[in-house]
Image (spheres, rainbow, N blue to C red):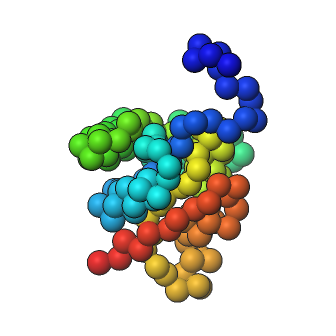
Amino acid sequence: MDAATPTPRGAPSSTYVIMVASTGEAIDRRVLDRAVELAGQLPSRPVVHVLSIARVWGTALGLQNPGLYPTRKEWQAQVDLVAEAVKALKGRGFDASGRVVGSRHASKTIGKVAVAEGCEAIVIGAVPQARWRRLLRQDEADNLFRRSAVPVYVVDVSM
């Protein structure tokens, strides 16, 4: 196969991909540090994708309602968050890209995007919580850890 021929589907790529994910919160420096640490364990320099979820809050009477979608200000906040993380990763010498996706179910979306992008690992930050609080608030990092087909590294970002 020459360089112009694309890699067949299902075949391992020569490029490793790591995803830095956020469920809408700011991406902590420790999350980026963990992604860089994982990159150091790989045989070649990986591509890093930064993904943030702009929360869609559900439906009204079973129908989608425009008032439940993120506002322009909320979208812009997520775009700025991703741009800052991409800039920090590029400053460390990585090939980085980022995007914002709107979703009701952050953990499902992150998992699906990671599989579609061919990621080797997902790094996400989370504040540790008591079990009953995780059940009440639906801890997205915990859901992602339990359900993802891609290995997930949860970084403790508590103060």
Residue 10 location (% of width, % of height): 75, 35
Q: Quadrant of the N terminus?
A: top right
Residue at 67% x, 25% y: name it. 7
Residue at 62% x, 60% y: name it. 151
Residue at 47% x, 58% y: name it. 41
Residue 3 location (% of width, % of height): 57, 17
Residue 48 visible in image: no
- The tally of labels here is 0
Q: Is residue 83 left or right of residue 102?
A: left
Q: Is residue 3 left or right of residue 94?
A: right
Quarter of image, res 133: bottom right
Residue 50 location (% of width, % of height): 43, 44
Residue furthest to the front in view is 1
- Indicate whether 96 appears above or below 23: above
Q: Quadrant of the C terminus?
A: bottom left
Residue 147 visible in image: yes
Residue 72 location (% of width, % of height): 36, 35
Nearer to the camera, 139 or 137: 139
Residue furthest to the top in view is 4
Quarter of image, res 64: top right
- Indicate whether 11 appears above or below 2: below
- Indicate whether 32 appears above or below 47: below
Nearer to the camera, 147 or 54: 147
Residue at 54% x, 37% y: name it. 15
